[in-house]
Amino acid sequence: QDDQAPGQAQANQGTGKRAELAKQPPTLQNIYGRQHVLLDGRWNYIVDPYETGFYNYRRQPFDQSPSGAGGFYDDRKPKSKDDAVEYDFDTSPTMAVPGDWNSQSAKMEFYEGTVWLRQKFNAQPQDGKRYFLYFGAVNYEAHVYLNGKKIGSHKGGFTPFQFEVTGSLLKGQNAVVVKADNTRHQDDIPTVNTDWWNYGGITRDVMLVETPSNYVEDYQIQLAKGDMGRIEGYVQLAGDKRAQDVTIAIAELNLKTTVHTDANGRAAVSIALPKNKVRYWTPEDPKLYAVSIVSGTDKLEDRIGLRTIETRGHDILLNGQSIFLRGISLHDENPLIPGRLRGEGDMRMMLQWAKDMNCNYVRLAHYPHSEEMIKLADEMGILVWAEVPVYWTISWDKPEVFANARQQLTDLVVRDKNRASVIIWSIGNETPVSPVRTDFMGKLADTVRSLDRTRLVGAALEVHRSGDVITVEDPLAAKIDLASFNEYAGWYWTNNKEMLKYSFKVDYNKPVIVTEFGADALGGYHADSDTKWSEEYQDQLYKNTFKMLDAIPGLRGMTPWVLADFRSPRRPHPYYQDYWNRKGLISETGKKKQAFYTLKSYYDQKQQQYK
Ligand code: GCB
């Protein structure tokens, strides 16, 4: 196995025994703004539960052998009639990429393990350019080979990674082979136990990206913390001409600033904004400005919204104005396929459903959703809570597990830091209080703040019940910006008849955000409001919950669980569940349940209240 830092992309340069691991340049900012070719489409695949294509019969990895050869990535053909090869990509079935395998083959619905995927593509590499193979996400562990040679590996199912392939890319036909493995492990992030489907495969775009040899690697262009009059950020160049002039321009605002990068390619950016000219980004008016970043050798365009986000006591201030977060939680899953979201159409469907309910906010649970989703939220005017899969019972005491969590969080923040829609970075969900966990989570909060001071830090905490009083007693609350928690009154504890006896005492001078509540309802199943699994029960629970939560003085938002029914292996009841979590307000056929309309009218009221 590669002795890499978990979660981090590492490249093996060349073949041969214990090939050298080379550190990769950081992932490119704004990948869709780059010259690129999508390698999506039909990929041939081989299911390999015993990893026969990776290990020899003594369980040694082929790609660590003296020749580096022997694995399925060789994509071998028999040389003669007395040569036997036990696999064949050319005649293997194909699946769509992006796409999880579980939703593409009935045989693989519950499959967890290794699948090999191969795509052929043409390239015309030019001298003086650099090339990167970029993956939006592969769940969970990926080993990547280009033309039979290993170029690297990566762990972590929801964040992007790239390998530089300048020099190994051929003129004409190339073949990329990916070993994707979604086996669950106790020491991974997430760990073995989650309430969602462990969809495996190449679930997001694959791209071949071209840059000049000296390129803009990264930048942050956002309003300064709490300052609507100034943009603050930086640019970072890569290559060997690191000291250059870089011009940042927003033509529509008549703004142009030139900075000079230092020997490390870095320059701070500070731009004063003209008074009374800026249309600030809001859900009602999600204005994006075209921003260009031009160095001596490179040029990049982005569309960026300008807004501030802060808290003051119980209030959440967007551009200085108190708002209520009318939200809903959602998974990166299209219930109609069902499977991972694959493109703009199904992402738009999910966000439009949220808008139909008069939401201005979504919680993208429980892991990073795709970069395109965040861009769509920017465009459609939907505020975002973005999260990492630090979920339930992580191995808190292991440094390599922390390193993995930190890496995933870093990759999320690095990727989405220029998106106005993202206002909260969440460091985890329902993690059980203990000193070692609080230390781990506290360090994640520090990590976020060291990367991005402009947004809020949240976590979905648990509540404490003593008698009828519900409190939040978690030392982590002191480290984050919100009193944010999940509660399941009326579902996991008690029922519709009894739940109204509860009262919440949330003693923090912070905005209270209820990150989850909900009840399962099988779409189309009707009974009275005391009968669990019925639409009426779910609807009544929502009505009761609004009464309970409205009594909390600091309540400033909520993301009920959940927008749409989603698949989960933890939900085997043959009639009501059939491996679906039924807490959706929309059923697996896309039909809105009663509670959908109840939540909408509650949000209509909240909108009036916060006008
Ligand atoms: C939770 C979890 C969420 C589950 C949900 C449920 O507290 O955060 O991932 O799906 O409850 O339905 O039990």
Image (cartoon, rainbow, N blue to C red):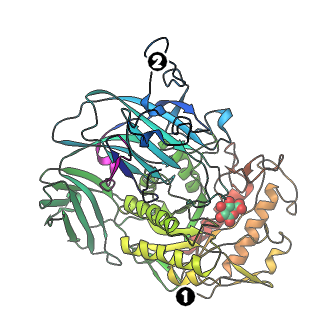
Q: What stretch is highlighted in magenta?
A: 16-36
Q: Position of residue 408 (x, y in %)?
A: 46, 61
Instruction: Specify the quadrant of the image occupied by residue 125.
Output: top left
Q: Which of 320 and 145 is in front in this view?
A: 145
Q: Where is residue 422 in the image (x, y as percent from the top left)?
A: 44, 64
**Observer-nearest residue: 598 or 118?**
118
What residue does disc 2 label?
78
Q: Taking 508 as reference, is 303 left or right?
A: left
For numbered disc 2, what is the local secondary structure?
loop
Residue under numbered circle 1: 509
In this rendering, the answer to whether 26 lies above or below 483 is above
**On screen, 322 above or below 356?**
below
Residue 291 lies within the magenta run? no
Judge by depth and name the residue closer to the eye, 548 or 490. 490
**Residue 157 in the image: x percent, y percent?**
51, 52
Q: Was residue 20 drawn as part of the magenta stretch in this picture?
A: yes
Q: In this view, does 147 lie above or below 369?
A: above
